[in-house]
Image: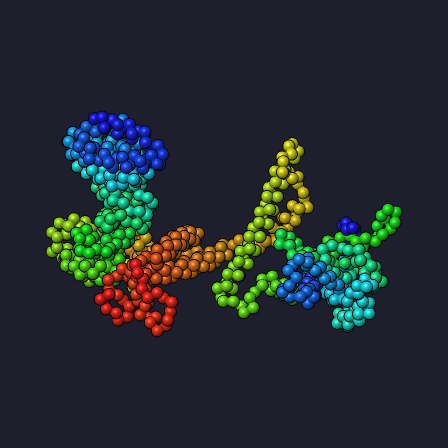
Amino acid sequence: MASSSSSGLTFKLHPLVIVNISDHYTRVKSQAQPPHGSSNGGSSPPPQPPRVFGCVIGIQRGRTVEIFNSFELLYDPSTESLDRSFLEKKQELYKKVFPNFYILGWYSTGSDVQESDMHIHKALMDINESPVYVILNPAINHSQKDLPVTIYESELHVIDGIPQLIFVRSSYTIETVEAERISVDHVAHLKPSDGGSAATQLAAHLTGIHSAIKMLNSRIRVLHNYLLSMQRGGFLYEFVEMAGDIPMEDSLLRQVSSLLRRLPAIESGKFQDDFQMEYNDTLLITYLAMLTNCSSTMNELVDKFNTAYDRHSRRGGRTAFI
Amino acid sequence: MESMEALITQIQGLSGSVEDISHLHNLLKLTEESLQSEAPRLASFLGQLDPAKQSLGYLYILEAYTSAPISREQPSEFIMSVSTFINSCLAEQIRLAADKFVSVCKRFKDQVVLLQEPLRGVAPMRTAVQKLRSSSEHLTALHPDFLLLCLLAKSYKTGLGILKEDIFEIDQPRDFFLYCYYGGMICIGQKHFCKARELLRNVVTAPMSTINAIAIEAYKKYCLVSLIDNGQFSTALPKYTSSVAQRSLKNFCQPYIDLANSYSSGKISELESCVETNKEKFESDNNLGLVKQVVSSLYKRNIQRLTLTYLTLSLQDIANTVQLNTPKEAEMHVLRMIQDGEIFATINQKDEMVSFHEDPEQYKTCEMIEHIDSSIQRIMSLSKKLSAVDELISYDPAYLAKAGKERQRFDFDDFDTVPQKFNL
């Protein structure tokens, strides 16, 4: 039912929307399902996770659609439609606070688009002639690297001679405001509530830096290999196509070169001096820490040795007549 | 003779796999006495065996052969055969009969020293040491012999290679004393006074139940080396020295302590008069060369003291303060010290002035990074070793017994689940 969109619209999604949808879903799910002690012995399959619905609002400027916020809506399963009066009331309230925002579409949870969604979509078409449909897939998939969020648009396609409205997938980018960045950071790092001891904080901090550097390293390596094979391929493509090599692609090369030129140009001697001095200082502190560590181990060892083998006991006051 | 033939064939047959080797080893242990009796005739049998593959058997026969006194005509041949054996033998096989190998090598060393050609023995002994020890941290009985040969042959650099490795396991305490003593002498020969002081201090502070001669000699040298290296010497030994050493070492080394006292006064004349009075004693201990180095180091010490007070100084003034005869001599001394890196200065020959500088090391070079990095690596491995030893001693029954005994009294009122006694 979904192919790629051809409307040429660019979608920008804010993290607030994603957090809102996920929050809504989690709340409903934890309220609906009974807590862990289900006594039916697990013979019945787990109940279907409830679907939640809501509205997304934002701004459309020309060809760019920016989805800023969202709110929840009541779903009426009998009519398979959203509660219209509630929607309008909410819309009025939001208009007062955010006069610029329009209703751009609606959201729901689930793994894929369903038949009933088209009704809701058509119902919304009188507010916005081309609403967007945001789906969040709540199933947790650890191997998946991308966000489980998909945006669908509706298009009129001719199928079997009948013009039909079908959902087509669109691509989107994530756009962040400073406040959102802070909260996403906080959620991503899952800091312990009491701040933890200094050691765990340091360890968490260093782990974060380590994984960031690792990712940077692997991406640079990918780029590097790409450029190398392009170099080989570009050099030889007139004569021999070596397996695995790629012909020159100028647009990508231009992007890479502009990226490289944006790197900070700190190559002066003074920078090297200061940097190395600071590096040496850090190394010295590490060395000092290790020396202290070693001395403490040594101290314990010597204590144990004295207790075990020394003829004269050194514990307070006891005589040597053991 | 038949038994010898049988033994030879057995050795040749059973030198293949590990089980065969241990079987062979047991057999050889049984035939030891018969081998001893046949000693003079064993030379011919040696030719039938291949030292590279049948090292264990070869070793047994060789040891029996060498236990008999060697006649004067044969030593050179003997040395040749032993060095080829050492170079070609298999390390795993000879480690099974380590004491026999050690005795063979000791005889080898004696012969080499007798022939007064210690240089011939240095390389085979080094191979022998490397094959005998189970790891680079293991001190065997051959280490001190190797160092002795290096000293006699004056090939100090080869000795230094072995000295660089840290020792964690020792076979016999006597080996350790000799090893550190000879090692200290080699370092003195190479003018690495810092490492020499460390090694000699190890001898002096090693645990000993009675005073031994090696420690006394080492103490004398230790006194002189710390004067050269550090400029001061205190008779107070570290706390971990054995009580025997703390009490008695000083009594044997009085002239050296007098020398140290006159050194601390800083006056050349006093030092030289002290040297004169005790000259025979120093000479009899073979330490006169070292004493002369102590005297020259006093000049250096005085010049270094000047850097703390003056920024620039004329050569004439240096000569006067340090009690040198001419400014030329002062210039020579200062120049040598600058080259050795002991002082940072520039000599202005036109004005005959010397200006002293600060240490120009800024600690921001890549070499410094590598230096610190290597130190960190070393200390990491040392730390691992320390934790391993700590764990080992934690389950030592002697420690547990004592620890349990003391805890019992503490926990009398606590109704702790500590067992009342460790019945070990």
Identified at 83% across, 63% down, the residue is A79
Q: Is residue A164 visible?
A: yes
Looking at the picture, tell me which residue is in the foreground, A106 or B196.
Answer: A106
Q: Position of residue A250 (x, y in %)?
A: 67, 44
Indicate whether A231 appears above or below B320.
Answer: above
Q: Is residue B379 left or right of residue B239?
A: right
Task: Give how far across and how far down residue A94 sits, in percent.
Answer: 76, 70
- Residue B234 visible? The answer is no
Residue B48 sits in quarter: top left
Return the residue nearer the eye: B128 or B351: B128
* Residue nearest the viewer, comparing B88 with B9: B9
Place of residue B49 in the rendered image (x, y in percent of width and height, measured from the top left): 28, 28
- Front-lying residue, A213 or A3: A3
Image color mode: rainbow
Q: Quadrant of the C terminus of chain A?
A: bottom left
B30 lies left or right of A145? left
Against B280, residue A33 (above or below) is below
Considering only vertical position in the picture, is A303 above or below B58? below
Instruction: Name the residue: 72% across, 55% down.
Output: A111
Give x and y (percent) for residue B281: 12, 52
In the picture provided, is B114 more to the left or to the right than A100?
Answer: left
Residue farthest along the right direction in this orientation: A161
Tally the marks. 0
Query: What residue do we see at 33% from left, 72% from top?
Result: B412
Task: Please name the residue shown 29% across and 55% down the image.
Answer: B352
Looking at the image, which residue sits at the far bottom? B413
